Image (spheres, helix red, strand yellow):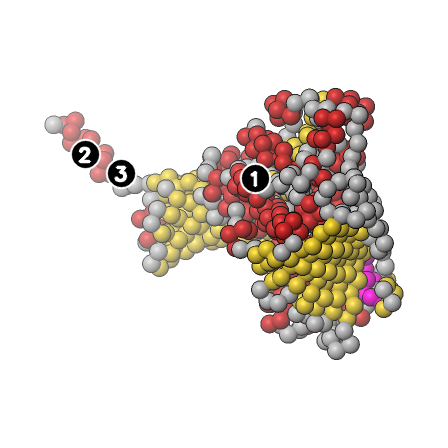
Amino acid sequence: MSENNQDYNRRDFIAAGGSLAATMSMMKAMEARAQDSEGKDAARRTSDDTPPVKMGLIGYGPRGREIARSLAQLPSAPLVAVSDHYGAMLRRAKREAPKAKGYENYADLLKDKDVEGVIIATAPHEHKAIVLEALKAGKHVYCEAPLAHTSEDARAIAKTAAATPSLNFQSGLQFRSEPQRHFMFPFMRAGAIGNPVHARTQWHKKTDWRRVSPNAEREKAINWRINPELSPGLAGEIGMHQVDLVNHFLSLKPKAVSGFGSNIHWRERFPVPDTVNLVFEYENGFSLTQEITLSNSFDGEYEVMHGTNSAVMLRGAQAWMYKEADAPLIGWEVYARKMPHYGAPGVVLAAGATTLSKGGKKLYQESTFTQPPLFYSLEAFAYNCHQVKTTVKDFVDTFGEADADTLRDFLKDQLGGTGSLLPAADATEGFVANAIALKANEAVKVGKRVGIEANDLTV
Amino acid sequence: MKKISLILLVALSLPAVAADVYKAKFGSKLRLDGDSSVHKWKAESRLIGGSFTVDAAALAKPGSVSAKAEVKIPVRQIKSGKKKMDEVMHGEKCFDVKKYPLITFALNGLDVKQARGSLSLCSASGSITIHGVTKPLEMPVTIARAGEKLTVKGSTVLKMSDFKITPPSPQLPAGKIVTKDEVKITFEWVTAK
């Protein structure tokens, strides 16, 4: 189900006055999701018959290995090549992914004609050079988030990707592809929470950012996160996914961010903050606060959006809605499952789960989307690569070669208009989230309020 | 002198044809609408290729027009927005896109029934090939002339079974979906010189 098909506009909802029509569209959305999740293997959205797109992986560090494990479960994205310039990692790749060819140099992987798409899992400051070469080599590109450690690099990536519409570019904002969060999108855009007032996100995990290696040069290379010159900070490495989600759901862009950071627990291990607090300001008075710490794990991670009618909390593969006593009845929530959470009964909003009756029976099915967000993000990448590849071929066969603008317009019309893509973040969305995160990191560094201008978010 | 007179006679006896070739351009739309035991369905594409050879001036008055057209539609670009439905629709038991990647229509007759300003209401006849099966087809079309551009709009209803396609009936946990045989095809084909 594409985003297109469920792009319920908040203005439309208000215009309808929370009417029967709006209620019915929400119910339709819920039922559609239930139908989508049916089948023998609903943990993924593609099937064993989905045409495969052969993948190359650049970088076999911890993130690269996580990617390889996800790809191993996706018949639509066979891993055919791995590149890592560190010998130990390349040998590990050969052991763990024996069918994939190994390359010490990513440039050699890009020359491999068997590779159709590349997934870039190196340090952010290395992304730009690799992305630009990969696109030049005619490969579809998945670039881990953040796209880059500077706005200039991220902008260069987004510009080049936009100028190459015949290739699918996806930025690694994995929540954009995750079914639970995607399921929530129409509810949020339809104004289910009323007027947005405030949002809060949290990421708590006790973990050491310093990585060790027997090789001093290698250790320096893999510790970019704790290098103040190269690190996008907690805001860029972690927080940007949650901030992007709130901005995407509520269709907002911040105008300023204030930040505070300190390192209390890991100060002997690394010089960048292990805990940050951020406040994002928006034009309409809405605000978003974010807490991130590497020093305590209590209460994990979640996002919660407060509105005048209700609050919606997302935590992992689950979500709940808490209505205010004076909020108008929407309709569908009467039939939805309630579950106590945070001391109050919340309406369960779960992708692939429903209590709607079908054929006289009242069904309830728990969500079957049990894989991590990365898995769904890679699934979307492979599927969308195939869609772009075949559509470009049919376009060229029909009309001949075209300039980038014509091809971009056509692809937007054909793939967007027919709802042919799985939800995923494109290069511009990756750039905007990246630029906001870098502003947040700057606010933490200077300990002051940092303005975010329209130009800062323009490719 | 005799030779010149003969050439002149032959030339005068031929109809004054100034046919131009209009090639398919980006901006076309195709839509299939159908029904099933569960709900109505639709599938769409923006990709209609081919070319249209016609004297555009002749479209401005009623009568038979000398015209040819070869229309090509890549079947795999016809999509419903639902992956599972597309897999069924494109699969071996339905359109079988691997074996029959294109729907084609060859125009061999065009009658202008009415002409109003830049619009011509016509009857188009030719042969359509779907799933490797070719059938004659006659349908009303509207042709709009705008400078170097000709836009052909029309719709017709076909039966899947006429083209040896068994209407899909996918099995769901709640039962089988039964798809109706009739499919309405609506199109807007944009061409330009």
Q: How far apart are the two marked residues, 1 and 2, measured between alpha carbons? A: 72 Å
Chain to which the residue tagged by mark 3 belongs: B
What residue range appears in magenta? A345-355
Query: Is A347 covered by the magenta stretch?
Result: yes
Disc sitting over residue B8 in the figure: 2
- Calculate the distance from the C-alpha at mark 3 to the C-alpha at mark 2: 10 Å
Name the residue nearer the viewer: B39 or A33: A33
From this view, report whether residue A210 is shown above or below residue A289. Answer: above
Query: What is the x, y in percent for residue B86?
Result: 67, 45
- The amino acid type found where label 3 is placed reads Leu
Mark number, residue B14:
3
> Circle 1 is placed at which residue position?
A153
Q: Amino acid at mark 1?
A: Asp
Farthest residue in the left direction? B1
Whole-percent x and y of residue A244?
A: 66, 53
The residue lying toward the viewer, choosing from B185 and B151, is B151
Query: Which one is in front, A230 or A458?
Result: A230
- Residue A270 belongs to the span the image colors magenta: no
